[in-house]
Image (spheres, rainbow, N blue to C red):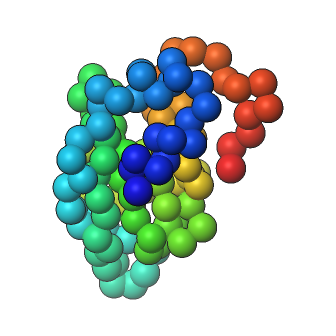
Amino acid sequence: MVGSQMDLIRDPEMSAALAPYLVSPALQFRRWDYSDPPSEFACWMVAIFPSRRLGIVYCDQGHGPDEPWALVDLDNPSFGMDSEWFLGLDDAFMRSGMWKGSLPPDYEVR
């Protein structure tokens, strides 16, 4: 799945910038705070940005059915806000602050 998402990145510089941060997908459980009582959903950590204490996870639950790629806080086990969940891996990378290049001319968050 990560490979398929990487193939969708049209800018080779962006793909090369993201590649060093990719990790072998690692299962983790993140807290879903939008239920009472809070529950947990399985997520897959696929990228880590140590200097920002952020990661990218994939999850098809919670916010995930429509936007399964998220930028998450490494120090907080929460799912986070819906504004940090995206349709594609590239969107999460661009929002991480780690992409220093320009946005594609036709770019809009999906």
User: In the shown orientation, is residue 9 left or right of residue 46?
Assistant: right
**Residue 73 seen in the figure:** no
Q: Classify residue 102 by image quadrant.
A: top right
User: In the shown orientation, is residue 90 left or right of residue 103?
Assistant: left
Residue at the far right: name it.
Answer: 106
Residue at horizontal 48%, vertical 35%?
93
Residue at the far bottom: name it.
Answer: 36
Where residue 33 sits: x, y (%)? 39, 70
Residue at horizontal 54%, vertical 72%?
65
Q: Classify residue 16 by image quadrant.
A: top left
Residue at horizontal 68%, vertical 43%?
109
Image quadrant in which the N terminus is located: bottom left
Residue at horizontal 45%, vertical 70%?
60
Residue 28 lies, with reference to residue 24, above or below; the image says below
Where residue 38 sits: x, y (%)? 34, 78
Residue 73 lies, with reference to residue 30, above or below; the image says above
**Residue 8 seen in the figure:** yes
Q: Nearer the viewer, residue 15 or 53?
A: 15
Where residue 21 sits: x, y (%)? 30, 31
User: In the shown orientation, is residue 33 left or right of residue 50?
Assistant: right
